[in-house]
Each structure stands twice: as structure tokens, then as C-alpha cells.
Image (spheres, helix red, strand yellow):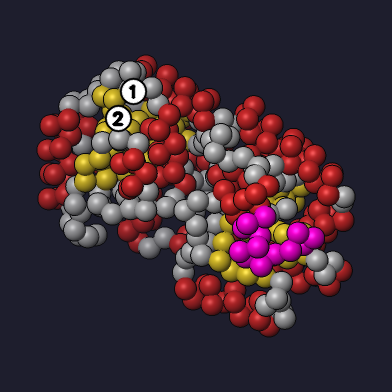
Amino acid sequence: MKVCFLIRSLNIGGAERQLLVLLKNIDRQRIQPIVITFYSEGTFLSEFEKNEIPIRTLQKKGRWDVFPFITRLISIMREEKPDVVFSFLVAANLLAIISKPFIHQKGTVISIRHAFLPKEDNDWLASLLYWTEDRISRWCDLIIINSHAGAERAINRGIPASKILVINNGIDTNKFVPDGALRERKRKEIGFKEMDVVFGLVGRLDPVKDHTSFISAAGVIVKKYPRARFVIVGDGDKPYQNQLEQQIFESGLNDEIQILPAELDLLPLYNALDICVSSSVGEGFSNVIAEAMSCEVPCVVTDVGDSARIVGETGRIVCAGNLDALISALEEMVRIQPEERKNLGIMARMRIKNRFSVETMVEATTREIEKLG
């Protein structure tokens, strides 16, 4: 069965990474994939090519390249003659549905990957795209959502529940593994000592991640526990990064907190951490939390999206925006014995292997595609 996977680009992002994981592990005897992208560039492009995943690009020339772009999409789709079109994220979802009458595929699957969208993060065009997705999603055959929180939000938006299926992200537990040598090397590179207790917040630099609470909590923790260290990893809006750097400076935490750029390979970084933190005010399914857990790193997370469902009994869960609760959870993680943190990490990895494996995600997705074809 031939399936066209439609996505905006192959730049770093949760959806892009999950598409790569899916297609690296999918049975090519059952599914013949081809990826169609709006734009030709992408950090993950070489990974797709290395895994011999065919890619075609629509060479979109910018925001206002609309009708010629849609014409190119329909032309390529007609050449490829897919049995199923499977789209990722809102713009691709709309195109998959709109082009359906012109391509005559057997099935159209759209994928929604979010559970929280602050209004201030969307310009008028993004808001229009989501508004349109809410209203025409009923014309597709299946809607796959990667979190229960995202499914609940979608239903509240008016998307038909009868077409929604939750398939959680799959975590490659063969890739994300505990590695003592990597831990030692990465901690030395960053400047951490073995006796340091290192907290890490990994993700794009965006207010939704609530880095300010993470920094505020760090300021309290280091006064009681001088060996505590904190690292923020991610790229994003430069003014927001400047704001965080100013907060760190004014708090006198330049020696205790570092901001590092996003890394394509997060395995060494996860291993360098003692505790992974998500202080977000909104999430869907957090790959970072699950990947860190797979590396035997226990997590402190806010109860947003599916974060509590992922962590379960293996970490600490606090209310979003509750600074005192966040401080208490981080302090508890510093205070407990290293052996207890290690045991939490072992439990965390087992939870990911048992509940959120790549194999489970790939088989569930393949099965649903085959039903349509």
C-alpha cells in the first residue's frame, strides 16, 4: 500500500521527529511511504535520506504562494497515486482534505499534535487555519491525535469524536538508553562535576514552557543545596531568551544556570541530567519527558497535557503555575539519596518500554492505515 505523508518541512520538531521514527520502523512490505514537504530544507532531511525514505518537495516560495503551490501538490499526488494520504499539522491537514476530491485516494488521515495553543502565539493567519481545521476535519476519514489531552481539546473545538483515535508517540528505547560514559563526557563538556545534582529543562524557548518559574525555583534551591545546577536547552525567540538571561543575571545565578542551544542528538544531554523538569503551562505528549525517562532520568512535571499520564509513579507531578509546589518537588529530588533517584529512573525506563514503545505506535498506525486502504 502506497502512503503519501504530507508535512510542512523536516526541521526540528516533535511531529517531524515522530514521522521519522514511524517511517524508520514501518514495515515496507506493508506500507510504501513517500514524504511530501512544502519546503526543501530541514535539519532532519539527512536522516530521512539515510534511511532511504523517498522525499518530494513542493518548493513553496513563501506564505502567499498559494494556488500555484496547491496545483503542484495535486500534480505530484496524481503522479504518485497514493492509496492513503497522511498529513501532519494544521496546514498540511487542510491541504490533505481540500485536495481529496482531486486525487481520489482511498483514505485521508490527518494528525493533530497539540493540546495547548496560546492565542498570543498565533497571528491572524494561524488562527484562521485552526478555525478552518475545526470545520472541515469531518471530511477526512480518520484523525490521529498523539495525546488524550489533545483529543479532549479537539472535541471541545468541535472536531467529531467519532473520527478521533489516540495513538501516543513512540519512544525508541534502543536509542534512548542510560550510558555512563556519555554522562561523564557530557557533564565534563558542560562544566558539571560528578557530585553536582543537575536539573534540566529541554524544549523550545517559549513562554508556554514557563522557564521563568524554573529559574525562580532554581534561585531558592541553590541557597539550600549549593551542589544543585540547572540547564535550559533550546532555541526560540531572541527577545524571550534575552529576558531569561536577564532574570538569571538579576538573580545572581550565572554560575548555577546555563542556557544552551538546541541539540539534534539529545541522548548525551539526557544522560548528563539527574532530573528532567517540565514546568510548562501547556503540553500535548511531551517527547522530552518520555525520552529522558527512557534514559533512566526521573522527571518533575506539571500536570498539563499527558505529562502526568507519562510519568505516573516514577517522578513528581505538580500543578502548573504553582511555584511553591515546583520548589518543593525539586527540593525533594535533591534531598533524596542517589540510590532512590536511580530506582525512580529504572522504574521510569520500564514504564516507557511497557507503555510508549516505538513498536506499539508503529503497529497501531500501520493497522489503521491498512483499514482505509
Image quarter hosting the N terminus: top left
Q: Nearer the viewer, residue 42 or 77?
A: 42
User: Looking at this view, is 295 or 102 the one in front?
Assistant: 295
Question: In this view of the protein, can residue 213 be seen by the observer?
Answer: no
For marks 2 and 1 on the same chain, the one whose residue lies earlier in the sequence: 1
Residue 350 in the image, given as x and y percentages of width and height = 69, 31
CA neighbours of label 2 inside 10 A, class few (<14), some (14 to 19), many (20+): many
- Magenta stretch contains residue 186: yes
Image quarter for residue 291?
top right
Type of amino acid at the residue the image marks with label 2: Pro
Bounds of the magenta segment: 184-196
Q: Is residue 142 visible?
A: yes
Q: Residue at x 72, y 59 (%)?
A: 198
Question: Relative to 158, is 103 above or below?
Answer: above
Q: Nearer the viewer, residue 204 or 172?
A: 172
Amino acid carrying mark 1 in the image: Arg
Q: Position of residue 164 (x, y in %)?
A: 46, 29
Which of the pair 152/274 is nearer the observer?
274
Tell me the quadrant of the picture where the C terminus can be found: top left
* Identity of the residue drawn at 76% across and 47% down: 316
Q: Position of residue 174 (x, y in %)?
A: 56, 34
Query: Circle 1: is it few (<14), some (14-19), or many (20+) Cα within 10 Å?
Result: few
Q: Classify residue 354 by image quadrant.
A: top right
Q: Which residue is mark 2?
A: 33
Residue at screen point 68% across, 36% down: 349
Residue 145 relative to residue 23: left or right: right
Q: Position of residue 233 (x, y in %)?
A: 57, 61
Who's the residue at 43% across and 29% down the image? 25
**Horizontal placement of 45 versus 251: left or right?**
left
Q: Is residue 236 magenta?
A: no
| Residue indicated by mark 1 | 28
> Is the C-beta separation of discs 2 and 1 under 8 Å?
yes
